[in-house]
Image (tube, rainbow, N blue to C red):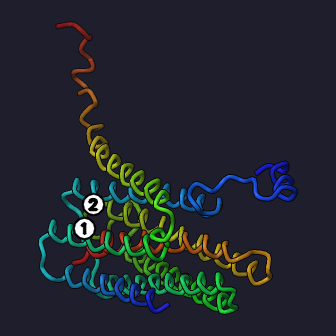
């Protein structure tokens, strides 16, 4: 909206057009980002599928303990963080101060997920895994796809935790309103949605 | 929040079913189909309820989701072309033969 239109609105009442999607521009931009990002994740998961089918010596290295169990705990942590994020969105839109506590819980759960993920990575790296090395002697593409897919997911979650921390701080100081929490919540639910595909396709399908 | 807690419990249930199926002795293809179907159900719940897409105007859904599905189908359709690259290179012996010599 131009400055002239804003001025007109003050003088003559509402002269703006109705929003075609019925959502604020920042929410629409977040949706567009999410769709583009979903295509990115879709692309790397398809690539993983083709690489896997095209590698006769594909390795299935994951034992139930510790890797799959760790993956289950990570999944529960991330799903629970979506629930606490929902609590934050609802509390903030109702103007309740508990929104800060819900946001704090979401940040804590997100951080726990990152710690669990990095712990798993460090164990694998200590065993000799890398994006170009397979200590079990099978296709080295396993490491490339595993670290590539989970790395991109982890990067999103780290970015989400940082974004949540910043939004929480500014919301607490009264510099942002509830709509920013809703928009950040959209992103947070999206990283949860991505993990819903990553866990079965990358972890469970590689379980021994 | 009770409604969302029920949905959250349902999502946890999906994870448990996925793990049970993984260790249930299914062959790879049925297991892949089952895991993908369960993941799609979970993703649908997150998208429609946690991300509130169900409560937005329908035009938002119809503008975003079919476009994403189309993009993913096209990605899936053209990825096998990546495997053609190696077989498209001319063999060394053939490349030394003058073009149109036969």
Helix, strand or loop for disc 2:
loop
Q: Residues within 10 Å of mark 1 (few under 14, many from 20)?
A: many
- The answer for how far apart the CA atoms under marks 2 and 1 are is 7 Å
Residue A205 percent across, percent down from the top left = 25, 71
Helix, strand or loop for disc 1:
loop
In this rendering, would A113 be left or right of B26? right
User: For the point 46% across and 61% down, which residue is it?
Assistant: B58
Is B76 above or below relative to A63? above
Q: Residues within 10 Å of mark 2 (few under 14, many from 20)?
A: some
Residue lying furthest front:
A12
User: For the point 65% across and 59% down, which residue is it?
Assistant: A25
Find out whether the residues at labels 2 and 1 contact each other: C-beta distance under 8 Å.
yes
In this rendering, would A75 be left or right of A28? left
Residue B64 percent across, percent down from the top left = 46, 56
Whichever of callouts 2 and 1 sits on the residue coming sooner in the sequence is 1
Residue at mark 1: A59
Residue A139 percent across, percent down from the top left = 27, 60
Residue at mark 2: A139
């Amino acid at each position: 909206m131009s400055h002239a239109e804003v001025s007109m609105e003050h003088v003559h009442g509402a002269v703006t057009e109705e929003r075609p999607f019925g959502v604020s521009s920042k929410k629409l931009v977040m949706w567009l980002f999410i769709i583009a990002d979903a295509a990115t994740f879709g692309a790397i998961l398809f690539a993983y599928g083709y690489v896997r089918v095209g590698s006769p010596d594909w390795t299935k290295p994951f034992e139930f303990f510790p890797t799959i169990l760790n993956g289950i705990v990570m999944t529960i942590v991330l799903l629970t963080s979506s629930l606490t994020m929902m609590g934050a969105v609802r509390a903030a839109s109702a103007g309740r101060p508990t929104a800060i506590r819900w946001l704090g819980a979401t940040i804590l759960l997100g951080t726990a997920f990152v710690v669990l993920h990095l712990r798993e990575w460090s164990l694998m790296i200590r065993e000799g895994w890398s994006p170009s090395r397979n200590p079990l002697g099978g296709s080295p593409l396993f490491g490339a796809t595993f670290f590539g897919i989970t790395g991109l997911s982890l990067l999103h979650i780290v970015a989400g935790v940082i974004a949540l921390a910043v939004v929480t701080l500014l919301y607490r100081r009264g510099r942002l309103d509830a709509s920013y929490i809703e928009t950040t919540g959209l992103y947070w639910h999206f990283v949860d949605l991505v993990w819903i595909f990553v866990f079965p396709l990358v972890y469970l399908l590689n379980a021994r | 929040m009770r409604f969302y807690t029920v949905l959250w419990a349902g999502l946890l249930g999906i994870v448990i079913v996925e793990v049970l199926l993984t260790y249930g002795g299914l062959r790879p293809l049925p297991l892949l189909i089952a895991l993908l179907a369960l993941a799609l159900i979970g993703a649908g719940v997150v998208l429609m309820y946690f991300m509130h897409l169900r409560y937005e105007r329908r035009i938002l859904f119809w503008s975003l989701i079919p476009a994403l599905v189309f993009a993913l189908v096209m990605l899936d359709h053209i990825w096998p072309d990546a495997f053609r690259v190696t077989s498209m290179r001319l063999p060394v012996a053939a490349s030394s033969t003058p073009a149109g010599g036969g």
